[in-house]
Image (cartoon, rainbow, N blue to C red):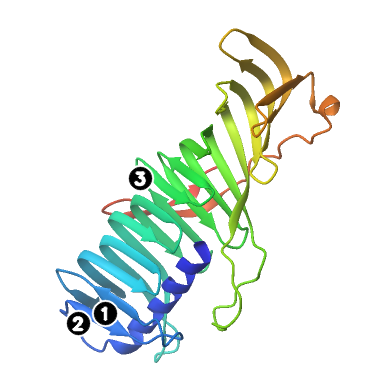
């Protein structure tokens, strides 16, 4: 999904080569690099270009559609800069209010979103923000951040991930993507595959609720969606209907419904979860304003 969103947002650059005056339009259609899927932008309250502010705004049930990618919001705002007096460069796109992003198989919802072209980062904020994928559901009550260069997504604030009635909760969840075939936006004939979530890591107040009814608590954890094996580390407690056990490390095979408790990771044969990723200088949107989050570690 993330790569498709990047393609659509990248194509928004062509707007600034077409507008020469402030516009008050309801619907616009543009050709893109993909002639079979032109971009359609519409807004109930019109589309305008503010030259002094260097922004392009679509207001009122705004939407941008290109192929099977659709972005909906109360407002869509493109920020640009002049390059050489003749050309322009869009460096950020904001979606404010009731944001919904659809791709062929995924849906993301939140109150606001920002895409930073230079950092290759998409940040969605909401209470909650929700991402539905074929691999399951991710929910956050602060932000969901997609880092294209690192192929990861971060959900912060009472985050939870659901798959096949197994639920993983944490202060922060990190989803790592795996792609079988490389993507090339300039070659429409290339066989392309969407990135799929292969691993979810949890940091802080981690809780795994399995479909068999167990609850496992720990300080850190990770869930391998391919092997369907989860591990929790640090002050681990395993609770079931009639018992409770404590240890240093737990391995949970969610497909078999088997949980094993160990004194530490050494006895288990599994590696411990890695350190929490450090995230800094991320653009965090608000429904009516956008600010810089200097350090969100």
Residue 53 is at least partly visible in this image: no
Query: In the rendering, at what x and y percent does residue 139 appear?
Result: 44, 41
Local crowd size for mark 1, using a 10 Å CA cut-off: few (<14), some (14–19), many (≥20)? few
Q: Earlier in the sequence, mark 2 or mark 3?
A: 2
- Between residue 53 and residue 169, name the one nearer to us: 169
Residue situated in front as seen by the camera: 20 or 243 = 243
Q: Which residue is mark 1?
A: 51
- Judge from the rendering whether residue 248 lies leftward or rightward of residue 48; answer left or right: right
Secondary structure found at label 2: loop
Instruction: Report the quarter where the C terminus lies.
Output: top right
Q: Nearer the viewer, mark 2 or mark 1?
A: 2
Left or right of 75 in this view: 188: right
Task: Please tell me which residue is depicted at 21% across the width and 87% down the height of the picture.
Answer: 21
The answer to the question of whether label 3 and label 1 lie on touching residues, with beta carbons closer than 8 A, is no
What's the CA distance linking mark 2 and mark 1? 8 Å
Above or below — where is 175 with respect to 185? above
| Other-residue count near label 2 (Cα within 10 Å), few / some / many at <14 / 14–19 / ≥20 | few
* Whole-percent x, y for residue 92 in the image: 41, 68
Residue pointed to by mark 3: 126
Position of 167 compared to 63: left or right? right
**Given this view, does label 2 or label 3 mark the residue nearer the observer?**
3
From this viewpoint, which residue is outermost toward the front?
256
Q: CA distance from mark 2 to mark 3?
A: 31 Å
The residue at the point 71 percent across, 40 percent down is 274
x, y percent for residue 14:
38, 84
Which residue position is annotated with label 2? Answer: 22
Q: Is the Cβ of the residue at disc 2 closer than 8 Å to that at disc 1?
A: yes
Q: Which residue appears at 32% of the width and 61% of the height? A: 95
Specify few, some or many for label 3: CA neighbours under 10 Å numbering under 14, 14-19, or 20 or more: many
């Amino acid at each position: 999904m993330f790569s498709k969103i990047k393609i659509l947002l990248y194509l928004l650059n062509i707007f600034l080569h077409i507008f020469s005056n402030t516009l008050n339009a309801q619907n616009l259609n543009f050709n893109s690099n993909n002639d079979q899927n032109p971009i359609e932008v519409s807004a109930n309250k019109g589309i305008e270009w503010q030259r002094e502010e260097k922004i392009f705004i679509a207001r009122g049930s705004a939407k941008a559609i290109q192929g099977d990618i659709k972005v909906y919001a109360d407002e869509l705002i493109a920020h640009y800069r002049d390059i050489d007096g003749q050309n322009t460069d869009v460096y950020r796109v904001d979606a404010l209010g009731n944001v919904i992003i659809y791709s062929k198989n995924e849906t993301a919802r939140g109150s606001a979103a920002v895409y930073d072209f230079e950092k290759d980062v998409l940040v969605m904020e909401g209470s909650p923000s929700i991402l539905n994928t074929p691999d399951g559901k991710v929910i956050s009550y602060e932000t969901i951040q997609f880092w294209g260069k690192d192929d990861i997504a971060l959900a912060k604030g009472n985050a939870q991930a659901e798959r096949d009635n197994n639920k993983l909760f944490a202060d922060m969840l990190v989803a790592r993507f795996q792609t079988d075939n490389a993507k090339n936006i300039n070659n429409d004939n290339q066989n392309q595959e969407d990135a799929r979530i292969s691993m979810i890591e949890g940091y802080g107040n981690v809780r795994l609720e399995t479909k068999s009814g167990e609850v496992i608590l720990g300080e850190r954890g990770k869930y391998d969606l391919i092997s369907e094996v989860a591990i929790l580390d640090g002050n681990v407690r395993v609770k079931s209907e009639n018992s409770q056990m404590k240890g240093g490390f737990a391995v949970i095979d969610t497909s078999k419904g088997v949980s094993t408790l160990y004194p530490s990771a050494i006895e288990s044969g599994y590696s411990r979860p890695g350190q929490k990723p450090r995230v800094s200088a991320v653009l965090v949107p608000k429904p009516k304003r956008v600010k810089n989050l200097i350090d969100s570690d």
